[in-house]
Image: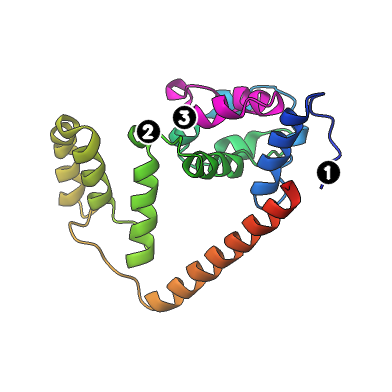
Amino acid sequence: MSTGVQVNSQKGAANFFEEVMLSTPGDTRLQMCIQCGTCAGSCPSGDDMQHSPRQLFAMIRAGMREEVLDSTAPWYCVSCYFCTVRCPQEVNITGIMYTLKNMAIKAGKFHEEEGADLSQSFVSNVENYGRSFEFGLATRNFLQHSPVELFRMATMGLGMWSRERLDLTPQRIKNIDQLKLILQKAKDIETASEIGQSEVMA
């Protein structure tokens, strides 16, 4: 399957570019990126990223698969969609970041200290309770990666709890079984999409 885009004269670069596009739901519009840097300037986590979204997209075009999947940048994406909203070319930047995370996990290149396990814990909470459990999520992450930081954040946590902005126990939504059916259907669709992609890339 061809995107109709002249990415690079090297077949490997074109293949990686297409793989990212095919792995991202909907129209990524990645081929429309003009390297303006609006995404980098808009990102609240930009200073912590190893590469900006603009740099990652240039690396994808250049076929730098290993470097892209090794990058810690996607793990700093907080999914605020600020970059996506401000992009003059309407590139689905946030969706592409999710794709790069998934590809990195499958390639065994994710960085646990940068948030892969945090993402998995979040998904587990949603599957079990239908919503995020912020107290448990943050506590588990700090205990795994920065126990000292947990004590520093305790004051803020107590302040949020005193103002009833933080629950100390998880709250399960009503009709959780219906949500589980929806999530399972989404997983089935993803699996079917991956099989189809494998056949296309073969």
What secondary structure characterizes most of the magenta part?
A: helix
Helix, strand or loop under label 2: helix
Q: Are marks 2 and 3 in contact (CB under 8 Å)?
A: no
Q: Amino acid at mark 2?
A: Glu
Residue nearest the viewer, comparing 44 with 24: 24
Reply above or below: 173 against 69.
Answer: below
- Looking at the rendered structure, the secondary structure element under dot 1 is loop
Labels 1 & 3 near each other (Cβ < 8 A): no
Badge 1 density bin: few <14, some 14–19, many ≥20, Cα 10 Å: few
Indicate which disc residue 114 carries: 2
Say above or below: 50 vs 168.
Answer: above
Kind of residue sitting beneath label 3: Pro
For image coordinates 17% across by 56% down, the residue present is 168
| Numbered range of the magenta stretch | 45-73
User: Is residue 56 rendered magenta in the image?
Assistant: yes
Asked if 42 appears above or below 139 in the picture, the reply is above
Q: Nearer the viewer, residue 99 or 157?
A: 99
> Is mark 2 in CB contact (under 8 Å) with mark 1?
no
Q: Which residue is mark 1?
A: 2
Name the amino acid, label 1: Ser
Which residue position holds label 3? 44
The foreground one among 43 and 119 is 119
| Residue 87 is one of the magenta-drawn residues | no
Residue 45 position in % (x across, y down): 45, 28
Q: Position of residue 66 (x, y in %)?
A: 56, 28
Residue at x 61%, y 41% (from the top left corner): 96
